[in-house]
Image (cartoon, rainbow, N blue to C red):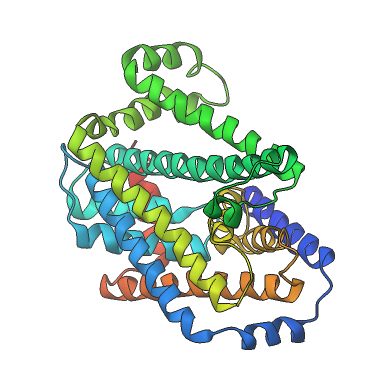
Amino acid sequence: MNWRSAALGLAISAIAIWLTLRSISVSPDEVWQAFLAANLWLFLPTLLLHLLNIALRAWRWKLLFLPQDRVRLPQAYAATHLSYLFNTFLPGRLGELVRGFLVVESEAVSPGRSLGTILVEKLLDIAMLLMLLAGLLGLSGWHDWARATGTPLPGWAAANAIAIPAWAQAAGVGVLVVFGSIALAFVVMSWARQRAVAMIRRWVDPLPLLGRLHPSHLVQTALGSADGLSRPRLLAAVLLLSVVMWVGGGLTLAVAVYAYHLPVPLSAAFLLLVVTNLSMTIPSAPGYIGVYHSASVLTLLLFPSVSEDQALSYAVAVHALAFGGVSLTGLFFLWVGHYRLDELVRRSRARMSLL
C-alpha cells in the first residue's frame, strides 16, 4: 500500500462526503435529534447480531481450510476480529493480510493457502450479494410489470417490492454482469485448472506490469484453495453458513432500521446490505468513511417516507456501532495476543511476500 493509493482512497471518501452533504440540507442538530428519537435500546441487539455474524464468518473460514489443513476456531475468530480492526484504522484493506498472517503463524499453514481461502471467501460473499441483488431487482421488475398489466401481486411481494429507479436498476444489472462474470470465470477455471494456469503463465505472466506478481501462481493457489468445496458435505456446510450470514446481516440492519422507526419494508434492509457492501469494494479512507455513509443515505432516500435527517443519522449511527464495536473487540484480541500494530503489519507483509 503506497501513498498514492492512500491518497486516492482519502480523495474518494472526501468526494463521497461532499456529495452526500451537498445532496441533502440538514443541520447537525437535526441529525442529532433524529438519533435521540430512535429506540437506542435496539442498538444492543444490533451490535450483538453483528458480532454473531463475525463468529459465523470465522467458522466458515475455518471450514475453507479443510480437508488439507486444520485451523482452530478460536484462532480464526481472533484473526477475523483483528482484520476488522486493521481495516477500520488503516488503508488498503491491510486487515486481510494480517488475518492471513496470524493463521499462518499459529496454525502452521502456508501463506498461499491462507490467502487463497480468503480469496475464495470473498468470491462466496460476492455470489451471495449477487443473489440478493438479483432477487431485489427481480421483485422490482415484477412489481413494475404487475402495475403495467394490472395483475395483482401476492401480499408479501407487494409489501416488499421496492421502486428502484431506472438508473439504479441499470447499475445493478451492470454489477451483476461484472461480478457474475468473475464468479463464473472462477468456476470454469476450477474445472480446468491446469489448462487455465498454463494459459495465464504463457500469456499473462510475461506482461511488463504483471511479471513481478506471478499471476499464474496466484491463480493456482486460489483455485487450489477451493478444492474442499468439491466435497458435497463440506460445500453444503459452507453454503449454509454463507446463507445464514447474509440473511442474518440483512436482519441485523432491519433491527437498526426499526430502531429509527423508518416506515420501510423488510426488503429495504437487504437493499442497504447489498449497496453498502458493494460500495465498500471502492477504494476509500480507513473504515470506508464517506463511501459507506453516501451509499446508506442514497439508498434510504429512495423511500419518500424517510427524511434526510433520519437517513444521515442512521448512516452515522450504524457505521459507528458496527465499526466501533468490532474495533473494541479487535483491541481486546490485540491486547490478549500482546501484539504491536506496526510489528504485526511489518511481519504480515514480510511473510506474505514469500508467496
Residue 249 at x, y percent in the picture: 44, 60
Between 67 and 161, the one lying in front of the other is: 161
- Relative to 309, does residue 9 appear above or below in the rendering? above
- Relative to 316, does residue 290 appear above or below in the rendering? above
Taking the image as shown, residue 187 lies to the left or right of residue 310, namely left
Tell me if I can see residue 86 in this picture. Answer: no
Query: What residue is at 45 percent from the left and 73 percent from the top?
Result: 46
- Relative to 274, does residue 119 appear above or below in the rendering? above
State which quadrant residue 191 falls in. top left
Residue 23 at x, y percent in the picture: 82, 63
Taking the image as shown, residue 7 lies to the left or right of residue 95, namely right
Residue 180 at x, y percent in the picture: 52, 31
Residue 239 at x, y percent in the picture: 31, 43
Query: What residue is at 48 percent from the left and 41 percent from the top?
Result: 131
- Relative to 263, does residue 83 appear above or below in the rendering? above
Query: What residue is at 59 percent from the left and 83 percent from the top?
Result: 38
Between 260 and 186, the one lying in front of the other is: 260
State which quadrant residue 325 falls in. bottom left
